[in-house]
Image (spheres, grey):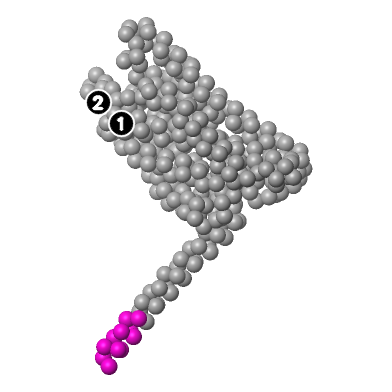
């Protein structure tokens, strides 16, 4: 995936802040990304704390824990995106962070959709085959599947990370992009390598990393709806409502980016030029998804909400009790010294 903080894969620079309208858009995107960063760090950090240390480890909580870990790590890339937008696409952070930030962004995309798909399939199995699920649906098996998902994600993003590097444009500004010059001796070979990588990127990102998982999710929902019944499907269980909200929010936030990515790789130069102004807004919308999940857990997840309220109230009560005990000890010590 080309998470385009600087310039798109075709090499044309995305210019935002060259007019009054584009400056307003630029400021709006920076504000949205900043809000996303604050909410995402706080919300996903809270989910990691709750699911990792306060709640029983089940198949579902382990999946949402890893989803929060992915979103939390993605938050680390947002300051770089914000600064790059403010600098009108210029990359100030060097070669290593160029590759590392792109790697984090790609991991978040693939791992999120794989985990959501796994949760949907898990829910589907529980509905369709409850006896089998009770006997074979274990936490250890879920951990193995999730570890396999992490490994698969790393394999998927490896080809992209090879070509991501820093390059200078004619004005001397540095950008973080996919560059094929060092992998081909002639311009003709560069074009061939670029076309091959574009085809691979479209296949991996748009088909394997988005379309196929979404098809699996829709199939799982169809099977569950047929089993439960249309009238009671959405109200059948709270975990199912949480999963529904998470899946819908992921699709709404990521579909525009996937569409632009697809058009940018298979379209002609005119198409690529037309979609360039939409790259950063689509990336910003995709980024916003990483702070939505904790909000959905709180509003829709009764167990998470109750556990959160209990933990916060217990922590506050413990802190106040400790302060009271400390003050009592001070008073006793003071009295003993006087006597």
Magenta stretch: includes residue 261: no
What range of the chain is rendered magenta? 329-339
243 displayed left or right of 147: right
284 displayed left or right of 54: left
- Numbered disc 1: secondary structure: helix
Residue to which mark 1 is pinned: 96
Please identify the quadrant where the N terminus is shown.
Answer: top left
Give 181 or 330, whichever is nearer the viewer.
Answer: 330
Please identify the quadrant where the C terminus is shown.
Answer: bottom left
Give 132 or 94, whichever is nearer the viewer.
Answer: 132
Q: Which of marks 2 and 1 precedes in the sequence? A: 1
Point out residue 173 in the picture as x, y percentages from the top left corner: 25, 25
Residue placed farthest to the left in the image? 172
- Numbered disc 2: secondary structure: loop
Disc 2 packing (10 Å; few <14; some 14–19; many ≥20): few
Residue to which mark 2 is pinned: 173
Magenta stretch: includes residue 333: yes
Q: Of circles 1 and 2, which is in front?
A: 1
Residue at coordinates 74% horizontally, 45% vertically from top-left?
131
Residue at coordinates 68% horizontally, 50% vertically from top-left?
237
Point out residue 11 in the picture as x, y percentages from the top left corner: 35, 19
Point out residue 254 in the picture as x, y percentages from the top left corner: 51, 33
Q: Is residue 224 visible?
A: yes
Residue at coordinates 41% horizontally, 30% vertically from top-left?
3
Q: How many marks?
A: 2
Give 214 or 169, whichever is nearer the viewer.
Answer: 214
Point out residue 316 in the picture as x, y percentages from the top left corner: 45, 68
């Amino acid at each position: 995936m080309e998470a385009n903080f600087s310039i798109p894969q075709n090499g044309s620079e995305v210019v935002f802040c060259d007019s009054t309208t584009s400056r307003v858009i630029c400021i709006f995107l920076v504000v949205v990304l900043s809000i996303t960063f604050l909410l995402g760090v706080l919300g996903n950090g809270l989910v990691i704390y709750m699911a990792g240390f306060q709640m029983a480890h089940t198949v579902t909580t382990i999946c949402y824990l890893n989803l929060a870990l992915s979103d939390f790590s993605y938050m680390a890339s947002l300051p770089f995106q914000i600064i790059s937008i403010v600098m009108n696409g210029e990359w100030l952070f060097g070669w290593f962070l160029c590759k590392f930030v792109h790697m984090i962004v790609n991991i978040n995309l693939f791992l999120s959709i794989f985990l959501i798909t796994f949760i949907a399939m898990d829910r589907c199995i529980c509905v369709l085959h409850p006896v089998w699920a009770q006997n074979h649906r274990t936490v250890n098996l879920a951990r193995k599947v999730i570890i396999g998902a992490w490994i698969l994600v790393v394999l998927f993003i490896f080809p992209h990370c090879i070509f991501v590097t820093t390059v200078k444009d004619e004005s001397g500004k540095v950008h973080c992009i996919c560059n094929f010059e060092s992998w081909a001796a002639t311009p003709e070979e560069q074009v061939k390598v670029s076309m091959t990588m574009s085809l691979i990127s479209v296949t991996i990102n748009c088909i394997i990393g988005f379309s196929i998982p979404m098809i699996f999710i829709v199939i799982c929902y169809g099977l569950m709806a047929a089993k439960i019944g249309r009238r009671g499907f959405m109200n059948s269980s709270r975990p199912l409502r949480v999963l529904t909200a998470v899946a819908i929010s992921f699709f709404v936030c990521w579909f525009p980016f996937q569409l632009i990515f697809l058009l940018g790789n298979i379209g002609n130069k005119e198409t690529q030029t037309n979609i360039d102004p939409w790259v950063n807004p689509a990336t910003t919308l995709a980024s916003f998804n990483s702070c939505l999940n904790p909000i959905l857990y709180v509003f829709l997840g009764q167990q998470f909400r109750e556990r959160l309220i209990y933990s916060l109230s217990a922590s506050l009560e413990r802190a106040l009790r400790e302060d009271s005990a400390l003050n009592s000890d001070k008073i006793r010590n003071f009295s003993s010294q006087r006597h």
